[in-house]
Amino acid sequence: MSSEDLGAFLRKHYGTLENCADQLGVDRRTVYRWCSHNPSGLLKHMPTMVNQCNTTPTQIMGEVMFQEDVLYPSAL
């Protein structure tokens, strides 16, 4: 599992969170919500992300799961 947070992962692939929002066709606030409250919200954009970035569905799922664990460590 990655040690970087979801925001760092998105910046790595899109340069900025704003560019990520533009490339995925969502509002910038949506991307910030993914990073701070609802990481699984980006999963519906996974096919687009796989096509746009040098990443895999498995990597994206891992980043989302890691971020959820960071945000909600006692959810298990």
Image (spheres, grey):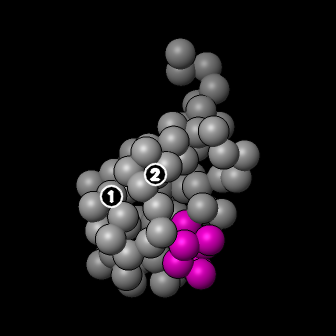
Give the number of the disc on residue 60: 2
Magenta segment boundaries in residue numbering? 10-16
Residue 53 in view: yes
- Extreme top residue here? 76
Question: In the rendering, at what x and y percent does residue 53 appear?
Answer: 44, 72
The residue under the point 48% across, 69% down is 54
Picture coordinates of residue 16 (x, y %)?
A: 58, 80
Say what secondary structure mark 1 lies in: helix
Residue at point 60% right, 61% down? 9
Q: Which residue is drawn at 38% across and 75% down?
A: 52
View extreme (right): residue: 3
For the image, the number of numbered tags is 2
60 is higher (above) or lower (below) than 47: above
Q: Does the magenta stretch include residue 23?
A: no
**Residue 29 shows in this picture:** no
Residue 46 tag number: 1
Give the residue type that dot 1 points to. Answer: Met
- In the picture provided, is 34 more to the left or to the right than 51? right
Tell me if label 2 and label 1 are in contact, CB under 8 Å: yes
Q: Would residue 1 be found to the left or right of residue 65 on screen?
A: right
Q: How far apart are marks 2 and 1 (CA)?
A: 7 Å
Q: Main secondary structure of the magenta part?
A: helix
**Image: 10 above or below 20:** above
Q: Is residue 12 magenta?
A: yes
Q: Which of marks 2 and 1 is nearer the N terminus?
A: 1
Q: For the point 66% across and 45% down, which residue is it? A: 2
